[in-house]
Amino acid sequence: MTEPMKSNPPGFRLSFLFWTGLILFVVGSGPLLVIILLAALGMTRDPNPNPVGLGILAFLTFWPSVGLMLGGLRTSVRRYRAAREQSFNQVA
């Protein structure tokens, strides 16, 4: 019974909190980054666009999304370490 535990260690999975932060980052900062990229590539009529609304959206969502991602990463690492320790304790 100990052989399957050795061959199947616990896997690392990112928590729901991390994925929520990543989605918030993409939805909040993504549009502004796309406008900046398109302007840099010369694909907009205005070479110096002024996306004020998208800038405010990015400002309001950037740090909360970073906080959620860091909190989710911390939660995932703690969960992984606890599962790995439990797995090794059962094998020994």
Image (tube, rainbow, N blue to C red):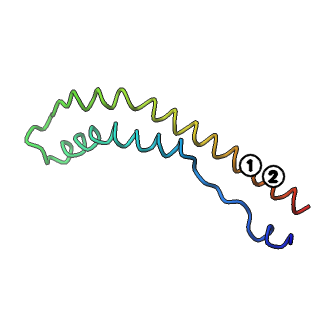
Q: Amino acid at mark 2?
A: Glu
Left/right placement of residue 67 relative to residue 12 reads left
Q: Residues within 10 Å of mark 2 (few under 14, many from 20)?
A: few
Q: Quadrant of residue 75?
A: top right
Left/right placement of residue 72 relative to residue 3 reads left
Kindly state the secondary structure of the residue where label 1 is placed.
helix
Left/right placement of residue 62 relative to residue 30 reads right
The x, y position of residue 62, in whole percent, is 40, 32
Quick one: quadrant of the C terminus?
bottom right
Label 1: which residue? 81
Q: Quadrant of residue 60?
A: top left
Which of the pair 20/43 is nearer the observer?
A: 20
48 to 40, vertically: above or below: above
Identified at 73% across, 68% down, the residue is 8
Q: Quadrant of residue 31?
A: top left
Outermost residue, right direction?
Answer: 92
The x, y position of residue 9, in whole percent, is 74, 63
46 to 4, vertically: above or below: above
Mark 2 and mark 1 in contact (Cβ < 8 Å)? yes
Label 2: which residue? 85
The x, y position of residue 76, in whole percent, is 63, 46
Identified at 30% across, 30% down, the residue is 57
Quick one: quadrant of the N terminus?
bottom right
Separation (CA) of disc 1 from disc 2? 6 Å
Mark sitting on residue 2: none
The x, y position of residue 25, in whole percent, is 40, 39
